Image (spheres, rainbow, N blue to C red):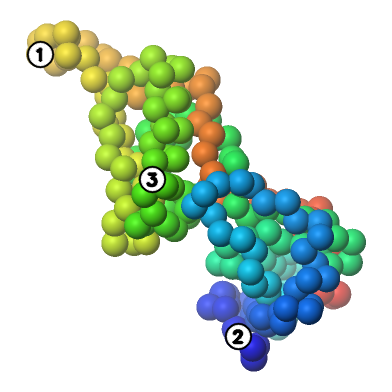
Amino acid sequence: MAEKQLPDSDEYGLQIRTRRLDPEELAEHLAPITLVEADFLGPVFAGFEVSLTYRYPLADINKHVMAALARTAWECGGPVIRVEDGEVRHGIDRVTFPAEVLAQQPCFGENVLLRLPLCDAYQDHVSAAVHKTLVQSGVKVSYLLSTGRKDHVKLCFDTYPDRPNVSFWRRLFTKEPTVAELLRGYEFTVIAHDPDLAHDGPFWRSRMPGP
């Protein structure tokens, strides 16, 4: 496959190109990979060699290069191997978040939960993870699991918990804790894109071009 430029240029003239590896090249790099097991994730069947260039050797280019590499890993949707030493980072993994992020407004999930909008198995996985968190925290709340037009799964929670026995007047005049406040201190674990990948400086810096 010919080189393909990813749409990831910025004001520093950063360009990222990928080249699909042929089966023989790919086989050389698969040994260190152990994937998270889930019935909605397919096998690693294609690899991309990523190269980058930038026009201006600015002092703060590192953070832009790191962010661009991490976005590229997100676009490719699989593990990243540092070819110099075989070090592996997973763009998709079993990730633990503070549970209060579920109630972030307006919704949680874009660029975090996987882009599998028509996959019932993944939707069931996300629903089960949410249910486990809510049971552990004792929070009863309405939410919408959406797999709509933007090609990703997202969760939209009500701001306040369900309180069927609380009177209208008490709701009106009493400050109720929000769902986010009630979820604070609990965790939510789900297979998702790992947001920490973009901030893994020691891993990415070995791939920095010279000054």
Apparent side of residue 206 relative to residue 80 in the rendered image (left or right): right
Asked whether residue 203 appears in the rendered view, the answer is yes
- The image shows residue 159 at horizontal and vertical percentages of 28, 30
Given the current orientation, which residue lies at the most extreme bottom position?
Answer: 2
Q: Quarter-wise, where is residue 79 in the image?
A: bottom right
Element marked by disc 2: strand
* Mark nearer the viewer, 3 or 2: 3
Disc with the residue nearer the chain's start (3 vs 1): 3
Image point 48% across, 22% down: which residue? 184
Q: Amino acid at mark 3?
A: Gln
- The image shows residue 48 at horizontal and vertical percentages of 68, 75
Residue named by callout 2: 4
Q: Is residue 49 above or below residue 193?
A: below
Residue named by callout 3: 123
Q: Are marks 2 and 1 in contact (CB under 8 Å)?
A: no
Number of the label disc, if any, that sits on residue 168: 1
Give the CA distance from mark 3 to mark 1. 34 Å
- The image shows residue 9 at horizontal and vertical percentages of 58, 77
